[in-house]
Amino acid sequence: MNTNSDSKIQSPSIIQALIAGFNTIANKPGLILIPIILDLFLWFGPAWRVDHLFSPLAQGFTQLPGANVGEFLPVFEDYQAVMQEILANFNLAVSLRTLPVGVPSLMVSKPSFLNPIGQPLTFSLESSFQFLITWLLFIFIGYFLGSLYFQSISKQIVSYDQDNFKSLLKSFLQIVLMPILLLIVTVILSVPLIFLVAFVVALSPLIGQLLLTLSMIFILWAIIPLIFTPHGIFLYQQNLIAAMITSINVVRISMSKTIWFFFASYLMVEGLNYLWRSPNVDNWFLFVGIFGHAFIVSAIIAASFHYFIDATKFSQTVINQKLKSV
């Protein structure tokens, strides 16, 4: 690597990354088609109800030991009412919106089972087997669409010579493994903390609540350095472990700028979402919100790719300079 050119590389610019992201989507507006299609499917397509399957569980809360005691009964009844309302408006198809990688969707935050032309075709899942198979199918499709969406954006930023379909399958496999690995890491971090919190709560509930909050902050702090893992997978065609290591190095060196980038991105997306979500689900103006949401979120994702490239160059420069000073 050229030392003279490396020494001139500055820390990543948040403003330049955002501008580059919006220019990327403006030059290729077709990139927003996948989130638009997903939202239209969730709006007008079939819906899958689960309230008949899970309502008995919600009703069973009032039958728990101690639930019928005078001071606890209102709490359990309120909780049961909230659960019943959530189940009555829950469409299992929202599982197509997968995390941490997936197609962004405005409609996952809107009530289901209604649109401007009436009520959609509805399927009621009556057994646990039907629920499990349908849910896994939606998750699988969601991760595949998310991989296709992220790859489509990344190809506009960094081109590579690999076959598109083979590259997509490779990235898809890494993305499917990612939540599994994150779950394992979270469980490993959580188990000792749960025992510690339970022990402290037995001694002092107040200190236990404080320790629980600190434990959640610690787990979040441990996972944040992995936030650029998908970027390494799609931009540099890395495997999951290599992408995680790259993400950790980048975030560790550019922590302050990275936090400000995602904070600014979050404010922009959520601030505009108040506007996009304002029409009701039976109002045709929600089309405007769907298009606006798809454009803004796609631009922010593209900006994160641009930012990651600059942050990677910056972190490599810092590491090289530290090695030379040793």
Image: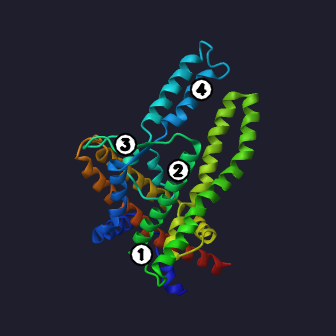
User: Taking 11 as reference, is 226 above or below it?
Assistant: above
- Per the image, label 2 sits on a secondary structure element best described as helix
Q: Residue beneath label 3, please?
A: 110
Q: Residue beneath label 2, please?
A: 135
151 lies left or right of 69 = left
Query: The N terminus appears in which quarter of the rendering?
Result: bottom right
Residue 269 on image: x %, y %? 37, 52
Mark 2 is on which residue type? Trp
Mark 4 is surrounded, within 10 Å at the Cα level, by few (under 14), some (14 to 19) or many (20 or more) other residues, namely few
168 lies left or right of 118 = right
Residue depicted at x 41% and y 47%: 108
| Callout 2 touching callout 1 (CB < 8 Å) | no
Q: Residue beneath label 1, please?
A: 155
> Quick one: 298 or 40, which is closer to the camera?
40
Mark 3 is on which residue type? Lys
Label 2, label 3: how far apart the Cα atoms are? 19 Å
Choose mark 2 or mark 3, whichever is in front: 2
Q: Which of the marked residues, 3 or 4, is nearer the chain's N terminus?
A: 4
| Callout 3 touching callout 1 (CB < 8 Å) | no
What label sits on residue 60 in the rendered view?
Answer: 4
